[in-house]
Image (cartoon, rainbow, N blue to C red):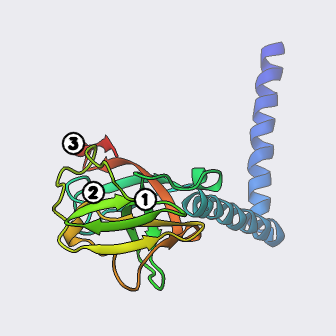
Amino acid sequence: MMEQAKQLTKAQLSSLKKSAEAAHENDAPYKRDSNIQFVLYLIMVLAIALSIRLFITEPVRVDGDSMWPTLKNNERLFVEKVSLWFEPPKRGEIVICYYPGYTASCVKRVIGLPGDTVSITNGILYVNGEELDESEYWDERGNIALDMGETVIPENSVFVVGDNRNYSRDSRAWGVGSIPYERVAARAHYVIWPLNARRSV
């Protein structure tokens, strides 16, 4: 008798559920509220995704050979933006930046910091009068084609160059110069694509 009561209760619940669904099919306010909730959910998901891309991280594609051999054309990078809120770019780091007047991003290496004096003589890069040791990532000492007179890096700015020095448009070029902090968008950390080339940078 008890088992029959339980089965009856389940049957009643199922019937009530079906009745409610059928009633809602013709309930315009209910359908409108459901549609609004769905739209709000989509907006929330898009807002979160956009916030992550704008303020936290995003994938970046290497376009060209200006960072060869460190980075190769069409490799994809994992970059992050949050650390720049608390700590300015450091010498030797690879960053994503925007040149003044440019809308496309560039991948370059930070060489000069605020207050530094950067120059190139006989193909060798000097910072504050001393040859910069770049053996960790660049082994073509004395192979920079064009010399450059002393350039003092302004406050809250960095001097950036490509590792492929003779095939890179960077802070050495007229119209580019030092890059203000606000135009340094992210730090590069890893190559994530292609899979067989994954590595830290």
Give coordinates of residue 147: x percent, y percent. 25, 73
Find the distance from the CA under tag 2 to the CA under tag 1.
34 Å
Rendering coords of residue 84 (x, y %): 58, 55
The N terminus, quarter of image: top right
Left or right: residue 146 versus residue 118 is left
Q: Amino acid at mark 3?
A: Asn
Q: Position of residue 179 (x, y in %)?
A: 49, 72
Mark linked to residue 128: 1
Q: Which mark is residue 75?
A: 2
Splitting the image into 4 quarters, where does residue 77 fall?
bottom left
**Mark 2 falls on what kind of element?**
loop
Q: Which mark is residue 152?
A: none
The residue mark sitting in front, 3 or 1, is: 1
Residue pictured at 64% horizontal, 55% vertical: 85
- Counting residues from the start of the chain, the first of labels 2 and 3 encountered is 2
Instruction: Tell me the residue at 55%/71% (across/down).
Output: 154
**Dot 1 amino acid type:** Asn
Residue 94 in view here = yes
Mark 2 or mark 1, which has the lower sequence index? 2
For marks 3 and 1, the one nearer the N-term is 1
Compared across the picture, whether 62 is left or right of 103 comes to: left
Q: Which of the pair 39/147 is nearer the observer?
A: 147
Tell me if label 2 and label 3 are in contact, CB under 8 Å.
no
Label 3 – label 1 distance at C-alpha: 40 Å
